[in-house]
Image (tube, helix red, strand yellow):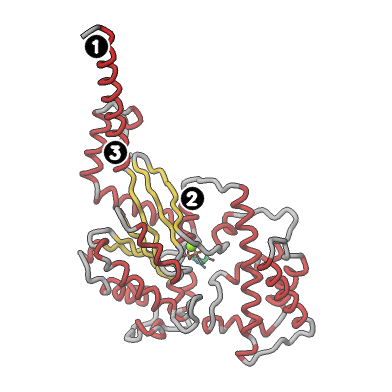
């Protein structure tokens, strides 16, 4: 063999082994990436949890996203007030202030126009009308008290309380506005969160009935399931179907999802959300109003009610080891609740996967991958 041929051959071998090495390292790094699914019916709080995770991990909002959430808040306020005024007649109520009827027409027109084009129909007059109806129209107060009979967003009060701020010329989106703004999720949204040496891919999905057939596409290789329950739903109704109780829907969906064969050994974190609203609501209405909890005869106090609900959900699991379920009671609107829950989820996943993850780190170190040289699972 002449010298040139020999050199070529050696080069080929070297670049091939380099490529193999790179592929192996990529493969090992992939195994440090854990996929987490956020599941639950619509409005349980999946996207709110993701927003809080982004805030905790300092994933900055782009300017166009900020604008989207600002527009979202205005749409939320307008839609919610129109729902309240529409509900008056079916509850034998009528406006009591002379100007209210005209103001409610203005709001209807603004919403209709905003469905048809992208123009800003949320004017100062619109915001003032919402504020007037919310603070000065007695029939709106009365219908608000009956809000569990029909569908309305859980955070409607927030949009009304803050509506005048939304039309300030220098309106800046606060952290709380971002968390409370409701934009319905469609499709599958994947977000990377770095917790070195691990990387988490957190998947958020649309929760409404028509969105759920898309869920199957992300059921493979799941490291943990975060199932979110809207506690406040025990006496309210679904967006998709006003005749279905929100908690019942959420319970049935949990039964169906968590018992799926594919999740037989998957750790499940059961997050009972909107504890703030629940705490307030159970003072006047027992959880036994929900059919699934009709056998509840306890004291009606917070912990007693929560324990009962927790037991019901756990007993719905007839697949795999029930001890793989961890329960949390949270209000996702508060960052501290998500911070402690997330820390616990990460710690638990490290513990469960410790042996495998330690081995991968060892292999990466053995290959002299510098970024892992000082890392271990505890870091
Ligand atoms: N009061 C209160 N509202 C919450 C809480 N968590 C979420 N929300 C509100 O519930 C609504 C639906 O939440 P979202 O995360 O969009 O639900 P998803 O459909 O499961 O993604 C939003 O308006 C949130 O601001 C909570 O802990 N307390
Ligand atoms: Mg969502």
Task: Out of 142 and 112, give the one closest to the viewer.
Answer: 112
Disc 2: CA contacts within 10 A as few (<14), some (14-19) or many (>=20): some
Q: In terms of secondary structure, where does tag 2 sit?
A: helix
Residue position marked by numbered label 1 in the rendering = 6
Count the labels in the image. Answer: 3
Residue drawn at x 31%, y 72% as measured from the top left: 255
Residue 251 placement: quadrant = bottom left
Q: Element under label 3?
A: helix
Assess mark 3: CB under 8 A from ligand 2?
Answer: no
Between the residue at mark 2 and the residue at mark 3, the CA separation in whole angstroms equals 26 Å
Residues at discs 3 and 1 in contact (Cβ within 8 Å): no
Residue 75: x %, y % from top left: 64, 66
Residue visible at 56% across and 81% down in the picture? 147
Task: Using the image, determine if residue 145 lies above or below residue 14.
Answer: below
x then y, percent, for residue 170: 73, 53
User: Closer to the N terminus: mark 2 or mark 3?
Assistant: 3
Q: Which residue is mark 3?
A: 27
> x%, y% of residue 360?
25, 38
Q: Disc 1 and disc 2: Cα gap in Å?
A: 54 Å
Q: Nearer the viewer, mark 2 or mark 3?
A: 3
Residue that label 2 marks = 54
Indicate the quadrant where residue 282 lies. Answer: bottom left
Crowding near pointer 1: few (<14 within 10 Å), some, many (20+)? few
Q: Position of residue 281 (x, y in %)?
A: 48, 78
Image height check: is 186 above or below 111?
A: above
The answer for how far apart the CA atoms under marks 3 and 1 are is 32 Å
């Amino acid at each position: 063999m002449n010298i040139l041929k020999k050199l070529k051959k050696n080069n080929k071998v070297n670049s091939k082994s380099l490529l193999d090495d790179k592929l192996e390292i990529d493969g090992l790094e992939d195994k440090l990436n854990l996929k987490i699914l956020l599941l639950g019916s619509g409005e349980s709080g999946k996207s709110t949890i993701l927003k809080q995770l982004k805030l905790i991990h300092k994933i900055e909002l782009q300017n166009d996203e900020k604008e989207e959430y600002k527009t979202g808040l205005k749409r939320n306020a307008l839609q919610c007030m129109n729902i309240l005024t529409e509900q008056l007649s079916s509850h034998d109520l009528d406006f009591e202030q002379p100007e209210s009827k005209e103001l409610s027409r203005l709001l209807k027109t603004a919403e209709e126009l905003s469905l048809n084009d992208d123009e800003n129909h949320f004017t100062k007059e619109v915001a003032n009308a919402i504020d007037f109806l919310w603070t000065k129209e007695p029939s709106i107060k009365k219908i608000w008290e009956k809000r569990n009979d029909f569908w309305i967003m859980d955070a409607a009060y927030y949009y009304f309380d803050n509506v005048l701020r939304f039309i300030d010329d220098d309106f800046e989106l606060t952290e709380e506005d971002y968390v409370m703004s409701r934009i319905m999720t469609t499709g599958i949204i994947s977000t990377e969160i770095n917790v070195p040496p691990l990387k988490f891919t957190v998947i958020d999905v649309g929760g409404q009935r028509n969105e759920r057939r898309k869920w199957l596409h992300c059921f493979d290789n799941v490291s943990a399931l975060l199932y979110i329950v809207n506690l406040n739903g025990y006496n309210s109704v679904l967006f998709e179907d006003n005749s279905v109780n929100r908690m019942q829907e959420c319970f049935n969906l949990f039964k169906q999802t968590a018992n799926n064969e594919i999740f037989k050994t998957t750790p499940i974190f059961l997050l009972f959300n909107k504890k703030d609203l629940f705490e307030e609501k159970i003072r006047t209405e027992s959880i036994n109003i929900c059919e699934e909890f009709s056998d509840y005869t306890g004291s009606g106090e917070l912990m007693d009610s929560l324990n009962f609900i927790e037991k019901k959900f756990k007993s719905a699991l007839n697949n795999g080891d029930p001890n793989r379920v961890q329960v949390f009671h949270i209000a996702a609107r508060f960052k501290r609740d998500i911070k402690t829950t997330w820390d616990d989820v990460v710690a638990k996943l490290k513990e469960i996967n410790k042996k495998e993850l330690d081995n991968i780190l060892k292999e990466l170190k053995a290959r002299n991958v510098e970024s892992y040289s000082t890392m271990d699972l505890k870091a």
